[in-house]
Amino acid sequence: MSLLNYFKTTKPNSAKLAKERLQILVAHERSSRNQPSYLPALQQELLQVIQKYIQIDQDAISVHFDSDDEQETLELNIVLPEPPQS
Amino acid sequence: MARIIVVTSGKGGVGKTTTSAAIAMGLAKKGFKTAVIDFDVGLRNLDLILGCERRVVYDFVNVINGEATLNQALIKDKRCNQLYILPASQTRDKDALTKEGVGKILEELSKTFKYIVCDSPAGIERGANLAMYFADDAFVVTNPEVASVRDSDRMLGILSSKSKRAENNDDPIKEYLLLSRYNPKRVKLGEMLSVEDVQDILSLHLLGVIPESKAVLSASNSGTPIILNEESNAGQAYLDIVERYLGEDKPHRFIDEDKKGLFGRLFRS
Ligand SMILES: Nc1ncnc2c1ncn2[C@@H]1O[C@H](COP(=O)(O)OP(=O)(O)O)[C@@H](O)[C@H]1O
Ligand SMILES: [Mg+2]
């Protein structure tokens, strides 16, 4: 490997990483921009109720709020664990 | 009727005050009667950047409280007779600015001024909210850096939902991106977000790129808005921005590295 190549390959492209992180974060924050402030608490309580019956992780549940001129919708998504293999 | 411009960002230290001073001076030098208002209550600084700190007698809050008239508080710039500065108050009372008070002052200024530039403080508290509330145009100053881009996006959300225009269902505030402290060399090395990266994320109309420049510090050292330093890249970038804002079609500059190599540097006096 030539010296030039060495510098090329070890050069970290941190700007690319920055962009990827921002794209994900900004998309997430935009979608939750006008959501009601009770959502995190609602999500937490739902999680507790479900965990009484099913073993699921914190990130297995997502609550999504949407609103337009017509209506407001609350979308609830729960990913259940894989059933045990028999 | 005046056009009200807010210079905003969310994050601190990105160049809002530098930009406010530059574009206010730029618009005034183009012959438009312009007022520039410091909304950073408790942390007055615009007066220093414009070099009129020793001429401050009354401030924004004095006018709101009826302790001085607007004419008494406005400081006329010594270099350009079309430019007036309304300094921020140094009070520590966070509630000194009121929506009614600010609205009344802007309305009165609107009768005689063509442009009103509002220098927003950092953050999303009262000062920042009032600086943008009455705006027609928003200059969103962003640095090519993750925290600044995220905060700008946050500010865009506030501009589109919490402004007077939004509340009255009028046309939304026109939003422009001013990408500041840009270093083409570091962008090329992959160390810094590029103009395209930032535009991809914020999808804003780019008004201009202001390069990182040593001249900015010396300009503020001497109380001269950087736009008056026509030799400097940053000064030229701000002049371009003013002209683009006024409708001139000017190609973007300062995005790519200076093409001049060693020879260019040797022969440049
Ligand atoms: N283009 C630039 N190049 C170099 N330094 C800059 C540039 N723009 C602003 N600065 C410096 O950054 C600092 C913060 O700028 P300022 O305008 O006060 O930001 P803000 O009002 O957003 O807090 C100051 O020290 C200023 O001199
Ligand atoms: Mg400032």
Image (spheres, helix red, strand yellow):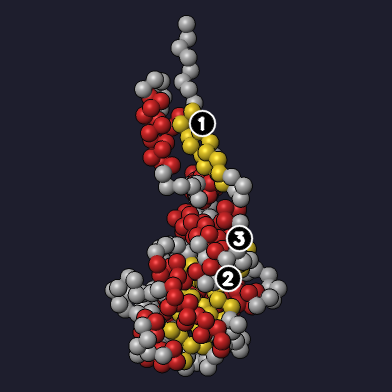
Residue type at the position of mark 2? Asp
Count neighbours of disc 1 (C-alpha within 10 A) and say few if under 14, some if 14 to 19, many if 20 or more. few
Q: Please report the residue visible at 37 percent of the width from the left and 90 percent of the height from the top.
A: B68
Q: Which residue is tagged 1?
A: A77
2 or 3: tag closer to the N-terminus = 2
Q: Find out if the beta carbon at label 1 lies less than 8 Å from the nearest ligand 1 atom.
A: no
Q: Which residue is tagged 2?
A: B137
On the question of residue B26 being in view, the answer is no
Of the pair A75 and B11, the residue shown nearer to us: A75
Q: Please report the residue visible at 63 percent of the width from the left and 74 percent of the height from the top.
A: B245
* Side of B214 relative to B62 (left or right): right
* Chain identity of mark 1: A
Look at the picture and state if B128 lies above or below B186. below
Q: Nearer the viewer, mark 2 or mark 3?
A: 2
User: Which secondary structure lies at badge 3?
Assistant: loop
Look at the picture and state if A39 lies above or below B23. above
x%, y% of residue B213?
A: 48, 71
Q: Which residue is tagged 3?
A: B204
Q: Please report the residue visible at 50 percent of the width from the left and 62 percent of the height from the top.
A: B162
